[in-house]
Amino acid sequence: MPEQPGELLPREFLARPAPEVAPGLLGCVLESETDEGIVAVTLTEVEAYNGEEDPASHAYRGQTARNAVMYGPPGYAYVYFTYGMHFCVNVVCMPPGTASAVLLRAGQVVAGEELARRRRPVDGPARNLARGPARLCQALGITRALNGVDLCAQASPLRLRPGTRSEEKNSIDTGPRVGVSQGADVPWRFWLDGEPSVSAYRPWVPKRRART
DNA sequence: TGCATGATGTTCT
DNA sequence: GAACATCATGCAC
């Protein structure tokens, strides 16, 4: 239970490079409020994308209409559509002008599990409802409509609260990022050790084109 | 149990 | 026209 309902993550906390912010986001609570109800998850896996100097970032080739949110002030949500069927959500870092962001990859549902389960009917009970970026968004009901919302505002449908130190700071492990073709040698993926729900490292596999 | 492939829409060159 | 920060499914062993 939240000690103070209005307590949100301070925006200044996010006004730093993504690789520094990312480990701090582990254990934080992402809360989404829709007409159906509220679903909250504890972040267990994130990835840092360091703007234009990061070949794997959407901002690598400069600002576009899609990634404009990343160039804005920190504390906002950058939601994008990928692979034709999935959403992914990022937390914008760094002051305006710098496109740094943290991709939220996985989380543990701590509230509204019933609603999350309704959104994603899963048979396996042991299966995490938010194992993977796209699943995390679906469990929380995140769509492109939430692109650019303020994560540090109470009135937002998507809020970010500081992590409860009850987790006692589980060991944070790092490793190469997942699903990126470039920049895989940079260990900017962070996850809570001992969380089997995090996705396994998947080496870059060139999409085998149907070359008949 | 584990790997390999297909699906699907938006964005950028 | 091609790529993509993915997931679910099918088949093999």
Image (tube, coloured by chain):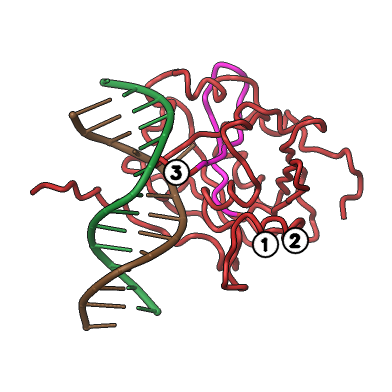
Chain colours: A red, B green, C brown
Same chain for the residues at labels 3 and 1, yes or no? yes
Q: Main secondary structure of the magenta part?
A: strand
Q: Is residue A34 left or right of residue A189?
A: right
Where is residue A88 drawn, in percent x and y? 52, 41
Where is A15 relative to B1, above or below? above
Where is residue A209 drawn, in percent x and y? 18, 46
Location of the N terminus of chain A by quadrant is: bottom right
Magenta highlight range: A87-106
Query: Which one is earlier in the sequence, the residue at label 3 or at label 1?
Result: 3
Q: Which residue is mark 3?
A: A85
Q: Which residue is mark 1?
A: A170
- Tell me the distance, in whole angstroms, between the alpha carbons under discs 3 and 2: 34 Å
- Tell me the distance, in whole angstroms, between the alpha carbons under discs 1 and 2: 6 Å
Q: Is residue A205 left or right of residue A158?
A: left
Q: Which residue is mark 2?
A: A167
Numbered disc 2: secondary structure: helix
Where is A168 relative to A20, above or below? below
Q: To which quarter of the image does residue A166 belong? A: bottom right
Residue at point 57%, 37% (across, down) = A90
Q: Given the image, on which type of amino acid does mark 2 rest?
A: Glu
- Tell me the distance, in whole angstroms, between the alpha carbons under discs 3 and 1: 33 Å
Q: Given the image, on which type of amino acid does mark 1 rest?
A: Asn
Report how many numbered discs are placed on residues in the image.
Answer: 3
Q: The disc numbered 3 marks a residue on which chain? A: A
Q: Which residue occupies the extreme left position in the image?
A: A212
**Residue placed most toward the observer, A174 or A55:** A55
Q: Which mark is residue A52?
A: none
- Whether label 1 touches label 2, CB < 8 Å: yes
Same chain for the residues at labels 3 and 2, yes or no? yes
Q: Given the image, on which type of amino acid does mark 3 rest?
A: Met
Numbered disc 1: secondary structure: loop
Residue at point 37%, 57% (across, down) = A202
